[in-house]
Image (cartoon, rainbow, N blue to C red):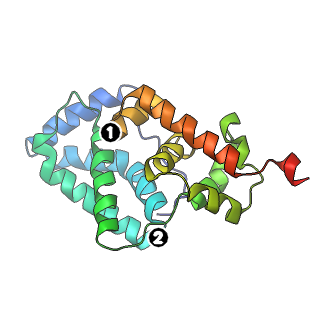
C-alpha cells in the first residue's frame, strides 16, 4: 500500500454510530465486525504511521501492530469515543514506542512536500508553497513534535481542529494555538518568494 494510492472514504454518513456498533460486536467476539472496522480504517492508520516513519515496510509492520493491539484491547473500547480516534491513539503510542526503541523517525517535511498537499494548498500553508526541501526541512526541524503532528493532521490529512483535539487528547483551543504558533514559526523561518526575489 503506497501513500499515493486512492484511499477509500474513512467515515461514511452515520459512520461513527456504525463504528461504535461494530466495535461492540467485535468486543463480544465477532471477528467479522472487527474485520469491517479494519477494512474501513486501515488506510487512514497506515497513512498516519507512514508519514511518521516514512518507510513502507516499517509503516506496514506498525499498522499491523496497531490493529493487533486494537484487537486485544477492543473489550475495553468505550463507544462514546470515536473508534478512529481510539485507533489513532493506539497508532500514536505505537510510533512513540517505535522511536524509543531506536528506530528512525523522519520529520514531516517530506509529508508536507508531498504532491497531495499542493493540490489544494490551504491559505495558511501558502508559506510552504515554493519552498525547497532543504529550507522546509530546516524550518520544520525547529518545530516541536506536537507542532509537526498538528500541521500534518490538519493540512495533509485534512482533519478539523476539533477532530485533532480528540485524536491527540488536547482541547480544541489548544490545538488552534499549536497550529497558530507552528505556522507563525514557519512564516518566520521560511523566506517569502518576494524576499527571495
13 in relation to 124, above or below: above
Q: Quadrant of residue 61?
A: bottom left
- For the question of whether residue 4 can be seen, the reply is no
Q: Position of residue 191 (x, y in %)?
A: 77, 51
> Is residue 129 shown left or right of residue 97?
right
Q: Secondary structure at mark 1?
A: helix
Q: Determine which residue is flagged by label 1.
A: 85
103 in relation to 158, above or below: below
* Mark 2, other Cα within 10 Å: few <14 / some 14–19 / many ≥20: some
Q: Position of residue 184 (x, y in %)?
A: 63, 40
Lower sequence index among marks 2 and 1: 2
165 in relation to 92, above or below: above
Residue in the image at 56% along x and 56% along y: 142
> Is residue 21 shown left or right of residue 99?
left
Q: Secondary structure at mark 2?
A: loop
Residue in the image at 52% along x and 47% along y: 152
Q: Position of residue 162 (x, y in %)?
A: 43, 28
> Is residue 194 shown left or right of residue 85?
right
Q: Which mark is residue 177?
A: none
Closer-to-camera residue (118/194): 194
15 in relation to 50, above or below: above
> Is residue 189 shown left or right of residue 110?
right
Residue in the image at 59% along x and 61% along y: 110
Q: Determine which residue is flagged by label 2.
A: 55
Residue in the image at 27% along x and 41% along y: 86
Q: Quadrant of residue 10?
A: top left
Closer-to-camera residue (145/38): 145
* Mark 1, other Cα within 10 Å: few <14 / some 14–19 / many ≥20: some
Q: Position of residue 37 (x, y in %)?
A: 28, 44
| Spatial CA span between label 2 and label 1 | 23 Å
- For the question of whether residue 64 can be seen, the reply is yes
Q: Tell me if label 2 and label 1 are in contact, CB under 8 Å.
A: no
Amino acid at each position: 500500500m503506497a501513500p499515493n494510492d486512492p484511499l477509500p472514504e474513512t467515515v461514511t454518513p452515520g459512520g461513527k454510530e456504525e463504528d461504535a456498533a461494530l466495535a461492540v460486536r467485535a468486543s463480544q467476539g465477532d471477528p467479522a465486525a472487527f474485520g469491517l472496522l479494519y477494512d474501513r480504517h486501515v488506510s487512514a492508520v497506515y497513512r498516519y504511521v507512514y508519514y511518521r516513519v516514512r518507510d513502507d515496510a516499517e509503516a506496514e509492520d506498525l499498522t499491523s501492530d496497531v490493529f493487533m493491539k486494537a484487537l486485544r484491547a477492543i473489550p475495553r473500547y468505550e463507544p462514546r469515543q470515536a473508534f478512529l480516534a481510539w485507533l489513532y491513539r493506539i497508532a500514536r503510542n505505537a510510533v512513540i514506542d517505535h522511536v524509543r526503541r531506536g528506530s528512525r523517525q523522519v520529520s514531516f517535511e517530506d509529508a508536507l512536500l508531498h504532491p497531495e498537499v499542493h493540490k489544494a494548498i490551504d491559505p495558511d500553508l501558502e508559506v510552504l508553497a515554493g519552498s525547497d526541501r532543504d529550507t522546509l526541512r530546516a524550518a520544520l526541524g525547529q518545530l516541536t513534535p506536537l507542532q509537526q503532528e498538528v500541521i500534518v493532521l490538519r493540512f495533509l490529512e485534512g482533519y478539523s481542529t476539533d477532530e485533532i483535539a480528540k485524536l491527540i487528547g488536547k482541547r480544541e483551543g489548544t490545538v488552534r494555538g499549536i497550529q497558530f504558533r507552528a505556522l507563525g514559526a514557519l512564516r518566520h523561518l521560511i523566506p517569502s518568494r518576494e524576499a527571495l526575489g
